[in-house]
Image: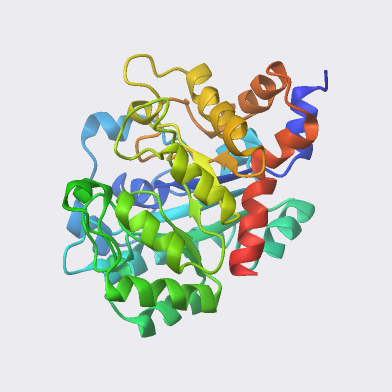
Amino acid sequence: MADPQALHEDALVIDTHNDTIVTHIRRGNINMSGGEKGKRHSGTVSYLRGPLDRTTREQEVQINFAKMQTGGINAAFFAVDVTRAWKNHLSYALDAFGFFNMETTDNNVVIVRSSADIQQAKSDGKLAAILVIENSDGTERSLNILHMLYEMGVRSIGLTHDPTSWAAAGNGETDSKGGLTKYGIALIKEMNNLGMLVDVSHISEHGFWNVMDVAERPVIASHSCCKALCNHPRNLTDDQIKALAQNGSSIGVTFVPRFVDESSPIFERLIDHIDHIVQLVGPDHVGIGSDFDGGGTLIKDATVFPQFTEELLNRNYSEQDIRKILGENHLRVLREAIG
């Protein structure tokens, strides 16, 4: 058997979802390098959301630049969920990305504008960050704003969170049978034209099938699990997984305990979700999407990512397939979606 640590360090590792930008701000603008509280003036996120409660603040963050390096994570999707920023969606996103942009300056972190940036960053010993808006209300229902977000480096947008957005019904509205709106259709088409990755995690099932009809490039389910193993509304049915594979997409299996198992959410059960997708559609459409600092608590933090490589080797996955699962599948989707 291959050496797990050596294989992990050599592989390209991509994690397709975290909520750590807002977490760092709500902890008092602590810096992303793993250091102490910053001296930066608080902005929109702080004033709208306030600080985290004391118990949470005393817990360590799950992912930052130092922990990415320790865990061998080469690239991560840094998402800003704007759902709770009612009537302030865009300013909330800009404030969060402004905080993050200043954090990257002295930390050898590359903001990804094309998929080639990820490979170059790994070659140069740097980290890569993909800027993501979770909930397309961050575009304020304007394709002009979408273009400006693209110009500043945003390369993926989640169409919804649990509630309905201007673009589509969220998974919290599944019973209403709502799907894409006219704006949602226009948004997907323009994202395809620009080169932005459409994220279908959180969308209602009816909305999901609308996206499959409209999208002309691969999409991503950045942080989702399998409904066949855990019957939660956020999880994907086998038919949805097959449709994503047919579209050339990828699924980031996530670490949120209630999405992994209803009674015994343990690490081995999380790997079962990877197994299920591979058995259903092969090894080319599954990866990892932690949801660190946003509910992905099944795994301690980013430093333990090598456990994935070790467990996949124990389950007799080939080195080639492990490399796909760790990051190459996500990289292929990014290459086809954003260039």
Rendered position, 151 above or below 215: below
Residue at point 27%, 64% (across, down): 43
Tell me which corner region of the image, top left, top right, bottom left or bottom right, holds residue 257. Answer: top left
Tell me which corner region of the image, top left, top right, bottom left or bottom right, holds residue 52. Answer: top left
At which x and y percent is residue 39?
A: 36, 56
Residue at point 64%, 20% (across, down): 311
Tell me which corner region of the image, top left, top right, bottom left or bottom right, holds residue 285. Answer: top right
174 and 330: which one is in front? 174
User: Which quadrant is the N terminus positioned in?
Assistant: top right
Rendered position, 118 above or below 279: below
At which x and y percent is residue 103?
A: 50, 58
Residue at point 42%, 25% (across, down): 229
Q: How many marks?
A: 0
At which x and y percent is residue 24?
A: 38, 47
The answer to whether any part of residue 305 appears in the image is yes
At which x and y percent is residue 207?
A: 32, 57
Q: Residue furthest bottom?
A: 144
Rendered position, 62 above or below 220: above
The answer to whether any part of residue 33 appears in the image is no
Residue at point 68%, 57% (across, down): 118
Q: Residue furthest right?
A: 2
Colouring scheme, one of rainbow, by chain, secondary structure, one colour = rainbow
